[in-house]
Amino acid sequence: MMRISDTVKHLIIINVIMFVGTLTVGGGETFYEWFALHFPASDSFKPWQIVTHMFMHGGIGHLFFNMFALWMFGSPVEYRLGRNKFLFIYFSAGLGAALFQLAGYYFTYLPAYDELIASGLSPDQIVEMMKTNKVLSGTSSDLIPALQTVYGSYNSTMVGASGCIMGILAAFGMMNPNAELMMIFLPIPIKAKYFIPGIIILDVISAVTGQSFFSPSNTAYLAHVGGALVGFFIMWYWKKNQFNQNRWDR
């Protein structure tokens, strides 16, 4: 069994501390209000949430599986690349995950918001309905689908290290394409060069259809895709421009 690397160990400790904070500070709601990533149009959005959401988790199971994956794939990646490059991939993938997920929200939010504005509602009226979840008197029932779409995006929150870990998983796969991996629910050895693209494809399908395969239905699938793609392109660039074919430098 591979010894846990120093940076991975510290990341796990920080994630655990943040999770304890969600259980002890303000009944959890306060911590989520401060540190989960809120929709940028919401009053609850704060710039630091772009980073802090990567250390937040929605439950003990969410935390456990993410930290298990971080240990399993993060340690060999850090030992191979070194601390600085590992952290660069980790946080870049986390930022890419947030960008992809927010872009997905805006893709549905903006057309629905424009429809509400075109109907004669003012921005202040729309925000009031988003905050209270109450339809203003006189609002046409034809606008309910648009209101529901805007409400879902406006009040969305994003937590978890999954995007970061997907980037690390992509890096691991590029360094160890023939390593055999297994899913808990599918205990069949599959080489990393097939396993990881397969996971990404399933996330894309889930993002498009809403159909969940191995994760809860509220999973930020686009975040997984974004994190994995960022990790892949960073490693592809480094391999092409900075490393020779025989070694991975620090």
Image (cartoon, helix red, strand yellow):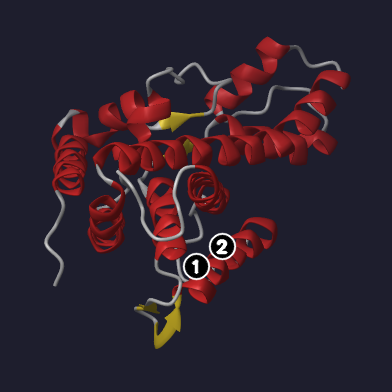
**In the rendered structure, which amino acid carries the disc numbered 2?**
Ile
Looking at the image, the residue that sits furthest to the right is 118
Q: Quadrant of residue 57?
A: top left
In the image: residue 107, left or right of residue 78: right
Amino acid on which disc 1 is placed: Ile
Q: Residues within 10 Å of mark 2 (few under 14, many from 20)?
A: many
Q: Is residue 246 left or right of residue 105?
A: left
At 31% across and 49% down in the image, what residue appears?
81
At 64% across and 36% down in the image, what residue appears?
103
User: Which residue occupies 72% across, 22% down?
Assistant: 137
For label 2, the SS is helix
Q: Which residue is mark 1?
A: 196
Q: CA distance from mark 1 to mark 2?
A: 6 Å
Q: Position of residue 20 (x, y in %)?
A: 14, 40
Q: Quadrant of the C terminus?
A: top left
Residue 58 percent coordinates (x, y): 32, 48
The quarter holding residue 118 reads top right
Residue 73 shown left or right of residue 173 in the figure: left
Quarter of the image for the N terminus: give it: bottom left
Question: Could you say which disc has been placed on residue 200 in the image?
Answer: 2
Observer-nearest of 143 and 237 = 237
Q: Position of residue 28 (x, y in %)?
A: 24, 35
Q: Is residue 197 above or below residue 85?
A: below
For label 1, the crowd category at 10 Å Cα-Cα, with few meaning under 14, some 14 to 19 and many 20 or more, is many
Q: Secondary structure at mark 1?
A: helix
Height in image: 29 above or below 69? above
